[in-house]
Structures are given as C-alpha cells and as structure tokens.
Amino acid sequence: MTTGGTRGTDGTSSTDGTGSTGDSDDTSSDADPGTNVTAEADPEPPPVPVLREPRDGVPEPLVDDARLRALETSLATGTGPVALDAERASGYRYSQRAYLVQLRRAGVGSALIDPIALPDLGGVHDAIGDAEWILHAASQDLPCLAEVGMRPARLFDTELAGRLLGDERVALGTMVEKHLGVGLEKGHSAADWSTRPLPFDWLIYAALDVELLVPLRDTLAGLLEEAGKTEWARQEFEAVRLAPPPPPRVDPWRRTSGIHKLRNRRQLATVRELWQARDSYAADRDIAPGRVLPDAAIVDAARTAPASAKDLAALPVFGGPRQRRRGDLWFGAVARARALPDAELPPITSGTGDGGMPAPSRWRERDPEAAARLARAREEVTALAEQHTVLAQNLLASDVIRRLCWEPPPPTPDAVAERLAELGARPWQVGLTAAPLAAVLPAPA
C-alpha cells in the first residue's frame, strides 16, 4: 500500500513538497554560522515481512488413492474458491505434464498431489464442482491440469488481473508484496519437478504458491471493481478458460537459436533435419530437446557441412561421449540434408503466415502502406492503453493488430468492430478500440 505526502515529527503534513514543516527559519537561527544544517532524513520503510513457510505447515504429497479420496471428501465440504497451481519440468522434460498439483480451500487447508503416482484427478475436479478456481498465469497451467482430468467451471487469473490494472511486474511474488505487503520465499521455479522424492524445501515453495492466492484474488477483485474493469476481467478470464490448444507452429525448426547466422538453403536443410532428429529422440525419451543436443551444435554442423561421421565428431559437442553414441543419428540427418535435390530445400525465409501475412520486419518492403497503417495502429493502441491504465498487449493482442492492418476492413467503426471480433478480440476490447482504429486505418494519400 502507498500513501501520499510526508509527515514531520509532530505528525503534521508537509504541504510545500519539500518535506519541511514550515519552521526551518527558527531552526537555522540557532545554528552556528557556516554550519550546514540538513533536514533529518525520513526513516527507512520497514522491511517487508517474508512468509517462509505455510501457516499450517508443509503437507506431504499425496501418492495413494485412500488419501486422495479423503481429500476429495474435504474439498466437497470446503467453502469458497479454490487456489490451484501446478509444477512442470520445463527445460528438463519434453512433455509439459504436471509433476505436482497444489491446491488450497477454506475449511480444507493446503494439499499437494503427486500426479505421477495419481494420474487421474477427475474425483478432485468433481469435488470442486463449480467453485471458482484461482490461478496465477492460468494459461500456463490449465493444459497440464486438463491432462489429469481437471477443468475449471469458473476462473480468476491473478496475473491477468494485474495486467488489466496496469501492473507491469506481474510475477506472483511481486504482486503479493505490492498488494498484500508480504514477501514470499521463492527460489525453485526452474527446478526439475520430475525429481523423486521432491526435496522438502521445494515442497515449501510449492505450498507457498497457493498460500496467499485467495486474499490476493479478493484484493485484486476490489481494485478491478473500483476501476470499472470487473466485466473486462470476466471476459478475459472466460477467454482463457475456454481457449483451445494453440495450433502447431509452422516450421518450428526455424526457431533454432543462431539460425540467423546461416546464409544458404542447404544449411537450413541441415538445421531442419538435425532439429527433427533431435525432436523425435527427445519426445521418445521425454527429455527436453536442448538437453539432448544444444541449438549451437546444430547450427555449427549446418555451417561447417561435415562430409563424414568422423568430421562431425571433430566438432565441439559432437565429440563428447554421449553424442558419439548418437553419432549415426546425427550424421544420418546431415547426410539426408546433403542428398536433398535443390527443389526440396527450404526457402531462406518462411515466407508468409496464415492469410499471406508476412513477418512484420518485411512489411515495409512488401507493402509500405500496410506498414504505415500498422505503425499508426500501434501508436493508437499504446495511447489508449495509457489512457485506461492497462498494458497495451492486453488491450489488443499484437497479432490482432497486425491482421487488422494487413487486410483492413472498410475504415468505419462498425466494420472494424466486426473484424476485431472475428480475430478474437473480446467485446470490451472492441468497444474501446474499434472507432479509434477506424480513424487511423486509411492509408495516407
């Protein structure tokens, strides 16, 4: 919480903006000539208290059906919303499955569930019923929770609420400190949650992630109501809850780090073949691809074009013991790329996306008028976001703006509103942006 102004030692408020209480002349008259008198500095604010352990202790992860059934019974008789979180092993495992599920509800307390030992949590879903779920950055956790049979009937996303309120820093710890005045002991967000048994300090971290979600939700809901943004939030939360899985990426191998260093199509073909070989190997063994073979090694092999398995093994990384054991896999990919006819080599750039829309970096070259429309539209959305104290990317998604500007509708508010809705903008977003964007869509004469 923040308060305005400063206070002197007698409790009076400063009104001149300097921190003075108005009696500085009397103070200076008692000082020796030449003495540099400075006002006493305001005391440092007290440190934010840090919650280092859950108030009810650290629950033991549930790994057997009997204890899970007992939890389901408790959840069904609990009250109010349910705070949830899930831990994955991103960077360690290929899959995005949940390796720990945390929840908390009034009348129940906190619980930790091991979804590896208990992969079907449909009973937990049924026990929660239509109670509101509270998650932080819900879009990250909903897919893996759905895999174990849990889908919310209602949702409140604390991270998204913060964005709608204009918060630029929306990490859970930051928001808890800002809105509740409490710090959270953190430190294991990037851990390998597939580890078994889970270390005790990791369990502390996991339980703390749901400890304060309910009071944070209540505070944010009040702020949204004060700002007139409750309906905005309802629409956004519902869009997250009902969002379909994202479509597969086109040419995902083009996201290989360092690929911009390559200059010809044969090199790109080598990246593609190595990337696909690595992806298949990683998926079969549920290992994060970067732990199987780093991107830098793929790019290095594409750049140097080794003519034999021996040449490939002479490169950094490929000469290591593990990579030598996979040498046939890697050189097989390099050989396939070398043997491809020119007609089957990938283009230097991925070309266009859906609807013929190129990457934004190529707009000025492909269609200068569209590039100008995009620049004006972005400026308008930024100005509107500042006016309404919301982050620009939450006022209107960047992809929606690009698609609107690449193939613009007639520059009328109704036509722009219809197109925005087709592109997935929510009603509150359409209402704020349709008319201003219609005004900037016409190409300059």
Image: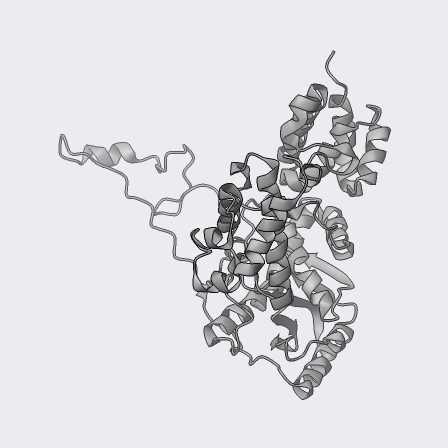
The answer to whether 395 is drawn above or below residue 175 in the figure is above
Which part of the image, by quadrant, shows the C terminus? Answer: top right
The answer to whether 220 is drawn above or below residue 130 in the figure is above
Q: In x, y percent, where is residue 29?
A: 20, 32
In front of the other: 373 or 395: 373
In front of the other: 149 or 186: 149
Residue occupying the point 77% across, 54% down: 244
What's the coloring here? one colour
In front of the other: 25 or 325: 325
Residue occupying the point 48% across, 52% down: 312
**How many numbered callouts?**
0
Q: Return the residue found at the far bottom.
A: 66
Q: Return the residue found at the far top.
A: 445
The answer to whether 404 is drawn above or below residue 77 in the figure is above
Image-based side of 202 in relation to 75, left or right: left
Residue occupying the point 52% across, 45% down: 299
Examine the image and state in which quarter residue 425 appears. top right
* Residue 219 appears in the picture as rendered: no
In front of the other: 336 or 290: 336
The answer to whether 375 is drawn above or below residue 106 in the figure is above
Examine the image and state in which quarter residue 398 appears. top right
* Residue 231 appears in the picture as rendered: yes
Image-based side of 196 in relation to 355, left or right: left
Q: In x, y percent, where is residue 347?
A: 66, 36
Q: In x, y percent, where is residue 145?
A: 69, 66
Q: In x, y percent, where is residue 123?
A: 76, 78
